[in-house]
Image (tube, helix red, strand yellow):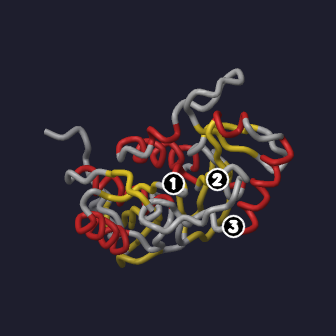
């Protein structure tokens, strides 16, 4: 027997009725495509009915009809990163360079040329992330890194455009190598491609039907997991 009383399907409003002999009332609940929830109270008829809403014990509105619970940003970042690791893209992120090491790992940098964290951990408030391997970053000056970051943000400003399955927008680092947000990797000699193009195409089609916005980081991560679960993989191919 499941420990859950109800499993919410995504994108379909569910009508919940209160255990009440005198009145017909309850809740309308929908799991949104972005991971959040939309909740409304109904009375007599199965449609939103005005009701007072309290948040942490304080009244925020006397006649609210719909309340939306947003998908927690930190949870979304964690889920996206886990999906990328599961799909094989995580190996490109590595653990990031530590203590000046030049072996493995990708880090992201800001417009001052400063290392601000691991590639793939960027927050939405940062804008478009720019990633470099520790080895390549060690060959560049702080000013060169800063300029590379500025070029990336200028030429590829869309934070919702994922790299996997889409042609990367490459920005020169002056060392013949380019990196894309969320670990998409492309050099002048090789690029990463799906081992099963037909299955990857089906994965993208499934994501387009499931999510209101596609492409997006969340939808593309879901597609990668769908693809990986069905036996899909990735391989390097000469450009």
Cα–Cα span, label 2 and label 3: 21 Å
Q: What residue does disc 1 label?
A: 184
Cα–Cα span, label 1 and label 2: 16 Å
Q: Of helix, strand and loop, which one carries label 3?
A: loop
Labels 3 and 1: the sequence-earlier one: 3
Name the residue: 51% across, 52% down. Answer: 185
Say whether residue 58 is left or right of residue 86.
Answer: right
Q: In the rendered view, would you say 176 is above or below 136? A: below
Q: Quadrant of the N terminus?
A: top left
Q: In the rendered view, would you say 3 is above or below 180? A: above
Q: Residue 176 got which mark?
A: 2
Can you tell which quarter of the image residue 107 is in?
A: top right
Q: In the rendered view, would you say 79 is above or below 193? A: above
Name the residue: 73% across, 39% down. Answer: 116
Q: Where does residue 118 sit, x and y in percent of width and height?
A: 61, 38
Q: Of helix, strand and loop, which one carries label 2?
A: loop
Labels 1 and 2: the sequence-earlier one: 2
Front residue of 222/103: it is 103
């Amino acid at each position: 027997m499941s420990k859950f009383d109800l499993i919410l399907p995504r994108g379909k409003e569910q009508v919940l009725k209160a255990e009440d002999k005198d009145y017909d009332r309850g809740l309308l609940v929908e799991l949104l495509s972005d991971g959040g929830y939309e909740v409304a109270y109904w009375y007599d008829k199965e449609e939103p009915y005005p009701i007072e809403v309290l948040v942490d014990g304080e009244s925020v509105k006397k006649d609210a009809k719909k309340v939306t619970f947003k998908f927690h940003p930190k949870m979304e970042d964690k889920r996206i990163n886990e999906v990328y690791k599961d799909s094989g893209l995580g190996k490109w992120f590595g653990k990031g360079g530590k203590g000046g090491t030049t072996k493995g790992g990708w880090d992201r940098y800001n417009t001052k040329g400063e290392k601000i964290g691991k590639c793939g951990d960027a927050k939405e408030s940062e804008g478009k992330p720019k990633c470099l391997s520790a080895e390549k970053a060690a060959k560049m000056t702080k000013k060169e890194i800063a300029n590379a970051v500025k070029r990336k943000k200028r030429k590829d400003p869309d934070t919702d455009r994922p790299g996997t399955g889409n042609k990367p927008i490459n920005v020169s680092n002056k060392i013949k190598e380019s990196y894309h947000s969320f670990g998409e990797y492309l050099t002048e000699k090789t690029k990463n491609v799906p081992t099963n193009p037909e299955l990857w195409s089906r994965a993208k089609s499934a994501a387009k039907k499931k999510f209101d916005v596609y492409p997006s980081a969340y939808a593309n991560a879901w597609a990668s997991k769908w693809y990986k679960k069905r036996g899909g993989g990735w391989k390097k191919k000469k450009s």
